[in-house]
Image: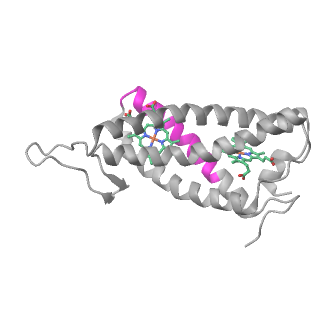
Amino acid sequence: MEKDTKTHLSVTTRTLHWTVGLLLLSLLAVGIYMTETKAYGLYGLHKSVGLIALILVIARSIWRVSNGFPRAISSQGKWLDGLAKTVHWLLLITALVMPLSGALMSWLGGHGLALFSVELVPANLDANSGKSTPINGQLAGVFASIHSLVGYLLTLGVVLHIVGAFKHHFINKDRTLIRMVFGK
Ligand code: HEM
Ligand code: HEM
């Protein structure tokens, strides 16, 4: 498979970057919307798409670590170069923690896991009431807090990242953004 070089970003890198990027932006938006408005009808969709994101994020992280990070096209000084690198790591790590904490909260909360209509882990139903009951309510709560807190961290990372990409494009007028689209 074509790998990244010092000057070129492979099709794999670009496809993974933009599909995972779009998925994560939608998951953040839907996640915040559904909890704010108590739109419980959206939970199943959020969880299914989130599980697909988990698989792609794992693939993306393995690809990134085995390829190394792309070399910056132009240096913005020590401080900004360091910030860009830190934010790339923050994005990769929070993008892994989000679907993992989401899946753990749902499973331990007794709600089960499904990929659309395909049941992966059945809900933990109470024999008497027939309602889903937590497997470990306390731990489920911990993962719910992590999911919410790390969601804000990811949002912060994405904002800094997009501001950085636009700064490269419109202020520095370099090919950083173009390279993530066209490869070189
Ligand atoms: C990259 C993937 C994901 C992102 C970016 C994401 C993002 C979010 C965000 C921002 C919220 C709102 C949190 C809050 O303010 O309380 C949320 C809620 C939620 N997410 Fe995710 N999520 C992801 C994956 C998952 C997965 C895989 C599951 C389960 C299988 C899941 C289950 C939930 C549930 C059940 C809630 C509602 C929690 C509540 O009602 O308090 N999420 N998500
Ligand atoms: C509209 C939104 C986005 C734009 C315009 C954008 C733009 C870019 C650009 C131009 C680069 C190349 C940086 C370089 O050459 O040094 C890049 C790299 C990167 N982006 Fe984004 N990005 C966006 C969304 C996201 C999101 C939501 C994530 C979260 C997972 C993300 C994660 C990364 C990572 C980890 C890298 C490092 C290189 C890699 O792993 O492929 N991006 N982005």
- Residue at image position (56%, 31%) is 152
Please identify the quarter of the rendering in which residue 177 is found: top right
Q: Position of residue 37 (x, y in %)?
A: 39, 27
Q: Nearer the viewer, residue 172 or 149?
A: 149
Quadrant for the C terminus, please: bottom right
In the image, farthest residue toward the left: 128
Quarter holding the N terminus is bottom right
Front residue (pair 78, 3): 78
Task: Find residue 40 and report its horizontal and vertical position in percent.
Answer: 33, 36
**128 left or right, relative to 61:** left
The location of residue 29, given as percent across then percent down, is 52, 35
Q: Is residue 154 above or below residue 180?
A: above
Q: Main secondary structure of the magenta part?
A: helix
Count of numbered marks: 0
Q: Residue at x 84, y 63 (%)?
A: 5
Percent x, y of residue 117: 33, 57
Give me the residue at 21% from left, 42% from top: 133
Question: Who is closer to the viewer here, 77 or 151?
Answer: 77
- On screen, residue 102 versus residue 87, left or right, reads left
Q: Is residue 77 left or right of residue 40?
A: right
The boundaries of the magenta stretch are 19-38
Residue located farthest toward the top when viewing the structure as drawn: 36
103 vs 172, left or right, is left
Q: Is residue 5 magenta?
A: no
State how the image is colored: one colour
Tell whether position 35 is magenta. Answer: yes
